[in-house]
Amino acid sequence: MKQVELYKLLSDENRLKIFTLLLHYELCICDLELNLKMKQANVSKHMMKFKNLNIVEIRKDAQWVYYKLSDWFIKDNQYLVQYIKDKAFKNNEIKQLIEMLKVKKACKK
């Protein structure tokens, strides 16, 4: 993956929020849809971009598909990952989303 593709991906505000949440949790589309107040189709389009760059790993459980950042991506981009994690807790909106997801996820596991 070229770095420019990664930066283009993260330049979108919604994808940056999704990325930040995936730094903390394995999530399904419905978790992201509910917490980011986005339509399912839009979340799916964003997730396809992550998938096309091999940034996420996918796990299926019945009808649900769960996404998490791939281990190789985190290892390969550890400084970027740490930077975004650090900045996330300075952003009240992101901090609230992370805290809300700690308590309640939309999909039944």
Image (cartoon, rainbow, N blue to C red):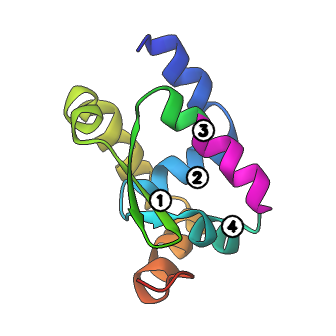
SS class of the residue under badge 3? helix
**In the figure, 53 relative to 63: above or below?**
above
**Left or right position of 64 against 46:** left
Give the amino acid at mark 4: Glu
Of the image marks 3 and 2, the number of the one nearer the N terminus = 2
Nearer to the camera, 17 or 27: 27
Q: Which residue lies most toward the front here?
A: 62
Magenta region: which residues? 39-48
Q: Is residue 82 magenta?
A: no
Within 10 Å of disc 2 (Cα), the crowding (few <14, some 14-19, many 20+) is some
Of the image marks 3 and 1, the number of the one nearer the N terminus = 1
For the residues bearing labels 1 and 2, Cβ distance under 8 angstroms: yes
Rendered image quadrant of residue 13:
top right
CA gap, disc 1 and disc 2 = 6 Å
Q: Is residue 46 magenta?
A: yes
Q: What secondary structure do most residues of the magenta stretch adopt?
A: helix
Residue at image coords 55%, 72%: 97
Which mark is on residue 17? 2
Which mark is on residue 21? 1
Give the amino acid at mark 2: Lys
CA gap, disc 4 and disc 3 = 14 Å
Residue for badge 4: 33
Residue at image coords 76%, 69%: 37
Residue at image coords 37%, 65%: 25
For the residues bearing labels 4 and 1, Cβ distance under 8 angstroms: no
Q: Nearer the viewer, mark 4 or mark 3?
A: 3
Residue for badge 3: 48
